[in-house]
Image (cartoon, rainbow, N blue to C red):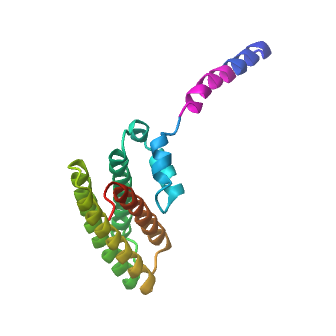
Amino acid sequence: MKPIAKNVALALSFFICLSFFPIINTAVTNPLLTETCQKVKNKDLCTSSLGAEHATQDAKDVAALALIAINVASNHGVNTSVYIKKQLLDGKILEPTTEQNFEDCSENYEDAMQELDDGLAVTLSRDFKQVKIELESAIDDADTCISVLNQKAGKDKELYEKTNHFRQLISNAYDIANILAPK
């Protein structure tokens, strides 16, 4: 390629990249998200996890944010459940205690996922007291998995971190539901 053509191509690439900059820079945080996340325990996680969801930009009320928060927690739970099943089915020989920890946590995740699904359904019916009950149960399931990992040999650091994150996401959803149905 001739030097002039190379410079033109480089300049054209540069201007094309710059033309996308305003699109990237125009993402504005929904003020409702900022206000709501200030009322939860894990403020930064709330802002980052919900802010990453496109639906948050269109949320008109706290109930919509509660739905999004439960969905975010549920998606994380699904991913961690897949991780657990993959470890159990991967063909690697796990130590018996580690395998038992994974099996116990798998059951906890199944229960938590059902409670999150129920929480989504009752959020749609706007029964926020029941939402809190479902989310409390899901938190208990995450706590049980964390306890299993803390008490027994064979602790899997990655599963522990994923479960702790899962618990925090559910806790954020609970705190948002608590705004809608305070004690």
Residue 106 as seen in the image, left or right of residue 28: left
Q: Which residues are magenta?
A: 13-27
Q: Main SS type for the magenta part? A: helix
Q: Note whether 34 is above or below 100 in the view shown.
A: above
* Residue at image point 53% right, 34% down: 27
Quick one: which residue is furthest to the front in this view? Answer: 183
Residue at image location 69% in from the left, 23% down from the top: 14
Say if 34 sits above or below 17 in the image: below
- The residue that appears at 42% across and 41% down in the rendered structure is 56
Q: Nearer the viewer, residue 39 or 138?
A: 39
How far from the left and from the top, in percent, is residue 69? 38, 52
Q: Residue furthest right?
A: 3
The vertical placement of 138 against 128, above or below, is below
Residue 52's x, y, as percent? 47, 45
Observer able to see residue 131: yes
- Specify the quadrant of the image occupied by residue 109: bottom left
**Residue 104 appears left or right of 4:** left
Residue 52 visible at all: no
Q: Residue 8 lies in what quarter of the image?
A: top right
Residue 136 place in picture, x, y as percent:
31, 68
Q: Quadrant of residue 138?
A: bottom left
Q: Is residue 149 above or below residue 162?
A: below
Q: Nearer the viewer, residue 149 or 49?
A: 49
Q: Is residue 124 magenta?
A: no
Q: Position of residue 64 (x, y in %)?
A: 34, 45
